[in-house]
């Protein structure tokens, strides 16, 4: 057993051992501080991480939510920022996202450069992550904010090539995203094709509303699945 020294290594080791992980995503602008305890108590027993972030978040709100959640929960809190303002030194790690499915330089490198002064003097573990937006059947907030077009689900080869380009560019994780509130989740065919091609862990999020959909994503090869909107609305069901 390899000694785990970082959150990335923990994810890598779990993927190697085929131990599936589950993250619950908190959108700071939708989080009710007064119900923090109840929110944490209803977390699935198999939850392994808390992700915090949103496409647009009120300034300072990310720090507030991370601090509150820290008081109630011992799970690792990983930032999933929509822009450079959503950084909190109170979190444990940061997905250093690059929207590699789009061609907008603002989310390929500009936001990352702006974030450096905020993260360089923190103890946050920085995890380089390739972020791929895939069509989930509706225009999502991340599509609007990033001004990029999601990749079509029927163009599996393009998605695989984009994921591989991310791996070859040094990304440590690939995040396949259908978007918050997606009508449908990412297909098993896409997940399987990407997982087969890559040597790094695959995260899948967007449109996962049931245990059955969660299991389908796992069976297809997802190493870590993210649930957000359905959990917030108490719509995640068996």
Image (cartoon, helix red, strand yellow):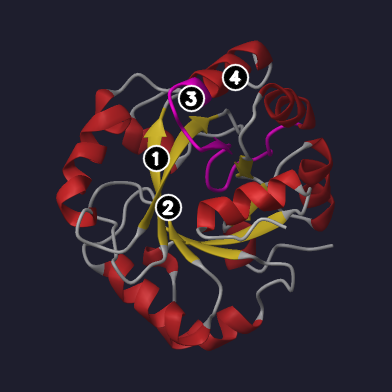
- The mark that comes first in sequence, 4 or 3, is 4
- The residue tagged 1 is 97
Is 178 magenta? The answer is yes
Q: Residue at x 51, y 31 (%)?
A: 133
User: Residue 177's x, y, as percent?
Assistant: 56, 38
Q: Are marks 1 and 4 in contact (CB under 8 Å)?
A: no
- The residue tagged 2 is 80
For the magenta stretch, what is the residue range? Answer: 167-187
Residue 166 is marked as: 3
Residue 219 falls in which quadrant of the image? top right
Badge 3 element: helix
Mark 1–mark 3 Cα distance, whole angstroms, equals 11 Å
Q: Are marks 2 and 1 in contact (CB under 8 Å)?
A: yes
Figure quadrant of the C terminus: bottom right
- The mark that comes first in sequence, 1 or 3, is 1
User: Residue 93's x, y, as percent?
Assistant: 41, 59
- The mark that comes first in sequence, 1 or 4, is 1
């Amino acid at each position: 057993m390899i000694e785990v020294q970082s959150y990335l290594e923990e994810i890598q080791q779990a993927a190697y051992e085929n131990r599936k992980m589950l993250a619950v995503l908190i959108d700071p602008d939708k989080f009710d501080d007064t119900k923090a305890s109840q929110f944490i108590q209803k977390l699935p027993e198999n939850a392994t991480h808390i992700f915090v972030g949103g496409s647009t978040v009120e300034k300072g709100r990310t720090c507030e939510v991370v601090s509150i959640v820290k008081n109630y929960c011992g799970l690792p809190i990983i930032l999933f920022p929509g822009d450079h303002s959503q950084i909190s030194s109170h979190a444990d790690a940061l997905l250093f996202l690059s929207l590699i499915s789009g061609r907008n330089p603002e989310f390929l490198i500009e936001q990352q450069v702006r974030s450096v002064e905020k993260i360089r003097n923190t103890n946050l573990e920085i995890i380089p992550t390739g972020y791929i937006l895939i069509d989930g059947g509706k225009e999502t907030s991340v599509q609007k904010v990033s001004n990029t077009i999601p990749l079509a689900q029927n163009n599996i080869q393009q998605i695989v090539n984009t994921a591989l380009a991310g791996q070859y560019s040094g990304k440590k994780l690939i995040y396949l995203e259908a978007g918050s509130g997606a009508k449908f989740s990412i297909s098993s065919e896409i997940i399987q094709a990407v997982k087969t091609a890559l040597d790094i862990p695959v995260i899948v999020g967007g449109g996962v509303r049931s245990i059955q959909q969660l299991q389908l994503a796992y069976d297809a090869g997802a190493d870590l699945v993210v649930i957000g909107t359905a959990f917030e609305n108490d719509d995640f069901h068996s």
